[in-house]
Amino acid sequence: MPVNYTGYWAMISNDNFEAYLKALGINIALRKIACLVKVDKEIMHEQEHMVIRTLSSLHNYVMDFVIGQEFEEDLHGVDGRKCMTTVAYHGDKLVCIQRGEKENRGWTHWIEGDKLYLSAHSLWGIFTGDAVCGS
């Protein structure tokens, strides 16, 4: 049975985030601002339905989806793009793959103890950014 991700996760650390944003093509001004913002996650997970709220003082983003089903994701407020997204389990890890104008973007979430981990990847599947949040 997959792990239930429900909870409020406050950011503890954020390593290599600027390098990740640079790989995504985000301009330097936005990268600097993004690196200063503390981002928390609130996740509601019920069976195969999941809502992930990414919360910060500058911008909130809501991702509402059914695990394993592709959906259109509008990232206008994040990095200005739309893509087709699928989030699925890979063991106990939650893996997101985004297809669109820029291929092979996404992230992986997993829980260890009372911490939620996020590893983001950009073009060519290179993992370039990691964040840790605690419950």
Image: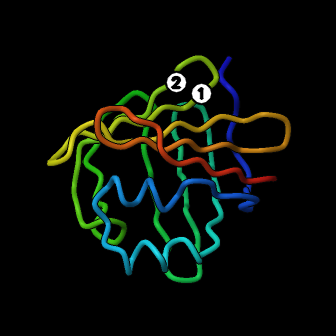
Left or right: 43, with 85 as reference point: right
Circle 1 sits on which residue? 93
Which of the pair 64/125 is nearer the observer? Answer: 125
In the picture, the quarter occupied by the N terminus is top right
Are the two marked residues, 1 and 2, in contact with CB atoms closer than 8 angstroms? yes
Number of numbered callouts drawn: 2
Instruction: Indicate whether 77 appears above or below 100.
Output: below
* Mark 1 crowdedness (10 Å alpha carbons): few <14, some 14-19, many ≥20: some
Mark number, residue 81: none
Which of the pair 25/69 is nearer the observer? Answer: 25
The residue under label 1 is which amino acid type?
Answer: Lys
Secondary structure at badge 1 equals: strand
Secondary structure at badge 2 equals: strand
- Residue pictured at 79% horizontal, 53% vertical: 134
The residue under label 2 is which amino acid type?
Answer: Tyr
- Residue 66: % across, % down: 43, 37
- Residue pictured at 24% horizontal, 42% vertical: 84
* Mark 2 crowdedness (10 Å alpha carbons): few <14, some 14-19, many ≥20: some
- Residue 2: % across, % down: 65, 22
Instruction: Indicate whether 81 appears above or below 126.
Output: below
Q: State the image quarter where residue 31 is shown.
A: bottom left
Instruction: Indicate whether 116 appears above or below 23.
Output: above
Circle 2 sits on which residue? 89
- Residue 23: % across, % down: 34, 53
